[in-house]
Amino acid sequence: MHVIWIPFLFLVGACVGSFLNVVIYRLPRGESIVFPASHCPSCGRAIKWRDNIPIVSWLLLRGRCRWCDVGISSRYLLIELLTAVLVAGLYVCYFVLRLRDGISGFTEDWPMFVAHAALLCGLLAASAVDIELFIVPLQVMWVCAAVGIASAAFRPNDAFVPHASPATAAVSAGVVVGLLAAWVLLRRGWLQPSFLDADDKPITDERESTVAITAQDGVNPRKEILREVLFLAPAIVLGIAGYFIATRIGAAERFCNELFCETSISKNLASGTGAVFGMLVGAAWIWGARIFGTLGFGKEAMGMGDVHILAAVGAVAGWKAATLVFFVAPLFGLVWALHLLIARGKRELPYGPWLALGTLIVLLFYDALVIFINRFAALIAA
Ligand SMILES: [Zn+2]
């Protein structure tokens, strides 16, 4: 079956890449990703279906518009090729090379594969936008998180998304309710947004975008970040309350244990809640680093886009994988920063691509990393 699946997934990946190109260009500019149909950005003429075949058309037209002969960015070809290689390559790594423990086969584990592939595609699109405009399209990460939660709830696999215990489920429920409450208060104007929600504004002009987002003159980062602490306060309080209710009050404890006993429905619930818990842990790592970093250095550290990225990683791959990514990603960023420092002088870099690269490494080599960490921990303890 591999002989059929690998080329098929390569083609699917190329088509997804073609769609990602639309997302990368239109989403940050506030345009619809459905209408109008693809057109040449230079002469505005509609692109015929035969000129819109992923990878092939770009090569046949030698990267030029059929009508006006203006060059089409090689980014289109690159994204289509990368997506195709990612999707087919992930299949090879999981189902042919069997890089991960706990995989039974494609017929059994396809929902997990779809979620992981969607996450990698989403991270590729987010990285491309982040490199160009220094923003992360949040909607892309929301879609990835939703696919992750749905996949975990549909086909539980403890080796990929650790199931939630009754206590972690209660904490997750409390935090989610707290976040929703704070979000409603923010929309109603009872809570003030931090940094004027710069991430939410669509980009209208490419040249102005990076200036508008990095320049925050007259803004006190420490004061701004305290607004985010206030935003998180209900979630923290309700999360702690959830933990104590589920572990200290007898009736609630019995209810939770009943809800999460070993029946089949309970397993789906525990797995789906485990994905939600992973999402919260992923977001908490970056948001925590953002709050303490900003308070410590008096300069905005990490973006809300990065918070959304690791939240999606946690929803798809579980809280342990998201935690690993949090610690693995800075290593790549550091190596790159050192290289830039030596080669061309200092330059500000978006963090999204390093989180994406860290995620790829953690997804593929999760088991080896866990063994390495356990040995390292044993060495220190000895
Ligand atoms: Zn044209």
Image (tube, rainbow, N blue to C red):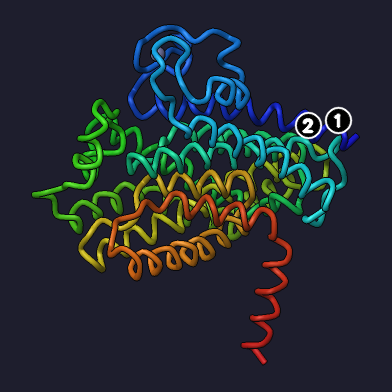
Q: Judge left or right: residue 189 versus residue 54.
A: left
**Residue at 29% across / 30% down in the picture?**
187
Q: Gap in Å between the C-alphas at discs 1 and 2?
A: 6 Å
Of the 4 image quadrants, the one containing the C terminus is: bottom right
Label 1 Cα neighbours within 10 Å, binned few <14 / some 14-19 / many ≥20: few
Mark 1 near mark 2, Cβ–Cβ under 8 Å? yes
Q: Is residue 29 above or below residue 298?
A: above
Residue 184, image quadrant: top left
Identity of the residue furthest to the left in this view: 218
**Residue at 27% across / 61% down in the picture?**
294
Q: Amino acid at mark 1?
A: Ile
Q: Which mark is residue 4?
A: 1
Q: Is residue 52 above or below residue 25?
A: above
* Location of residue 171 in the rendering, given as x and y in whole percent from the top left corner: 54, 52
Q: Secondary structure at mark 2?
A: helix
Label 2 Cα neighbours within 10 Å, binned few <14 / some 14-19 / many ≥20: few
Q: Amino acid at mark 2?
A: Pro
Q: Judge left or right: residue 71 versus residue 367.
A: left
**Residue at 39% across / 12% down in the picture?**
68
Q: Secondary structure at mark 1?
A: helix
- Asked whether residue 185 appears in the rendered view, the answer is yes
- Asked whether residue 191 appears in the rendered view, the answer is no
**Residue at 47% across / 47% down in the picture?**
175
* Location of residue 318 in the rendering, given as x and y in whole percent from the top left corner: 63, 51
The foreground one among 334 and 154 is: 334
Q: Which residue is mark 2?
A: 7
Of the 4 image quadrants, the one containing the N terminus is: top right
* Location of residue 206 in the rendering, given as x and y in whole percent from the top left corner: 26, 32
The yes-or-no answer for disc 2 within 8 Å of ligand 1 is no
Residue 289, image quadrant: bottom left
Identity of the residue furthest to the right in this view: 1
Can you tell me which quadrant of the image ligand 1 is in?
A: top left
